[in-house]
Amino acid sequence: MKRRDLLNGLSLATLSLTGARAQSVLGVSSAPLAAAPTPTAPTQAAQQGDTVGPGFTRIVIARWGDALLPSAPPFTPNALTAEQVRTQFPYDAVIAAIITPPPAQDGIPRLVMVVADPTAPARMVFPGGVDNPAVAGRLQGASVLNLQYMSGRWLTVDGGYQTRRITDGTLCELTGPVAAVIGSTVQGLLAPQAGCAAPWGNALLAEGHTSPWLQRLAGVGYGYADPAQAPRFGWVAELDALHPGAFPIKRTALGRFARAGIAATTTQDGRAVIFMSQDAPGGFLFRFTAATAATDGTALDSGTLSAARITSTGISWVDLPNTIPALVGAVDAAASAGASAFDSPGGIAIAAGNGTIYLACGGNPARTVPNTLNPRAGDGNGHIIALTPPNGDASAKTFAGQVILAAGNPATTPGTTYVTGSNGWLRKPRTLNIGPSGELWVGTDQSGDTSLGADGLFILQTSGPSPYMLSTAYLAPIGAAIGGVGFGGTTIFAAVRHPGATPSASFDAPATRWPTLLPNMPPQTTIVGLVRA
């Protein structure tokens, strides 16, 4: 485990910064968040540091520049090279999946964390904002990390068995109906914005907006300048994260479009079901229902792709044509089939038991007419939806639906809905996950503009004596967003994305230099662990 052994049993408050790769994080406010009967006061102003909610202690798991492979050199942010960034934790991070490997003979608990690495903006990554596409392509993609639990905390393992980076230079396989037309291999995984763990043990990584990356990488190689490359990107890639030699497999039966969220489950007869949201201000919600059992290695290569239509009581699913044009142009096919737009749909989480689908919506100021599941016109704050299938059947034709939270600062935003006892408020929910007790963990993302309040991680109760009561677990530094959440025992993992990246910030002049707060270090995306007291 190398340098991370030094952290066993140490408090962050007692650590001193000994170099760019030291694992201390400064600039944290330990003061408890103020609780109020109703969240009427705007107590969530963005700050240089982060704020940990009551009942939690914050530890560091990994941050931009930390070594992933044994060959990683020291982090030199002012002189990045493609070889350097290929071996280190990248600039951006969204927690996609956490998978528990089979127990080892030594009895040490272990986890494999899969992280999507969607962006590497030149203005925040390179001095002077001078782009280096060859380096940027290696910074984006995905990362697989080994974690193990020792001395009372989770530690990353440099050079762990499964640890690796997946980048623009990684060979991927293409399968399913469209592969016969566009080819069975492609170089690179581009702009994955979301991911999930599948019930059958693999991870799914959903590519987002790939066109800007293809333009940026046109001069790098791998044929990215060829227009024929475009149809080979924009898919969901399935990854066997426990086997380091496994290729990412892009499953074309799930349709091609830029995704913001993805979640997987199974039908009552064991078939795979994948829910996916389109990353757009008026995006669609899709569902793929496999034709065969999820344990079949080719289950995601044949099935039915559907899109949601909003009704007076929830949604109904409309099937899309089972044709190659409909799969390649899934958004156009959904529009033609009469699917409904949601206000910036994002993260998706599926509850155990009744199979309720939770959908985060970031809002859409351009909406003029509200409806059942988009409750406010001209809204840029967002909301959260619950979609419940009859008898927990994920393949049902209709789901009941309701808005369970309308977001925004209640002191200034009309139409917000927070139940009595909530001790916080949020804007632009983006990522969702279900906690061990069935609670919903909500991460927000205001695209770096935290002038109206800090982004953070919030807990929304979904049952018990106070359903839909909101509490604040963590507030991120200025310019940062929350890139997903995962769980390991009593530890909640969260990705603090792009701190300091406000709209006017740059590598040379970030809004904060968290976590080190040192003048010669850039702000660093950091995977943190919130440990329950």
Image (tube, rainbow, N blue to C red):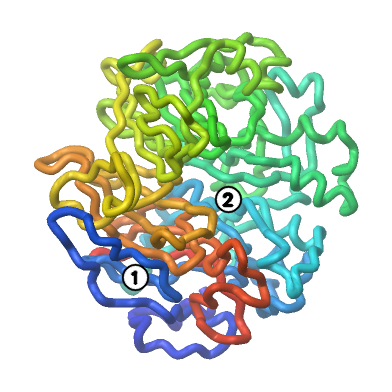
Residue 485 at x, y = what percent? 41, 52
The kind of residue on which mark 1 rests is Thr
Residue ID at (56%, 15%): 303
Residue 256 at x, y = what percent? 66, 28
Residue ID at (33%, 64%): 44
**Disc 1 from disc 2: Cα separation:** 25 Å
**Residue 440 shown left or right of residue 127 in the figure:** left
> Which image quadrant is residue 313 in?
top left
**Residue 490 shown left or right of residue 484 in the figure:** left
Q: Residues within 10 Å of mark 1 (few under 14, many from 20)?
A: many
**Residue 318 shown left or right of residue 133 in the figure:** left
- Disc number lying in front (1 or 2): 1
Mark 1 — residue? 51
Give 28 or 174, whichever is nearer the viewer: 28
Rendered position, 350 above or below 446: above
Residue 116, numbered circle = 2
Give 323 or 130, whichever is nearer the viewer: 130
Q: Secondary structure at mark 2?
A: strand
> Which image quadrant is residue 172 in?
top right
Residue ID at (57%, 11%): 337
The C terminus - image quarter: bottom left
Count the marks: how many? 2
Residue 26 at x, y = what percent? 43, 81
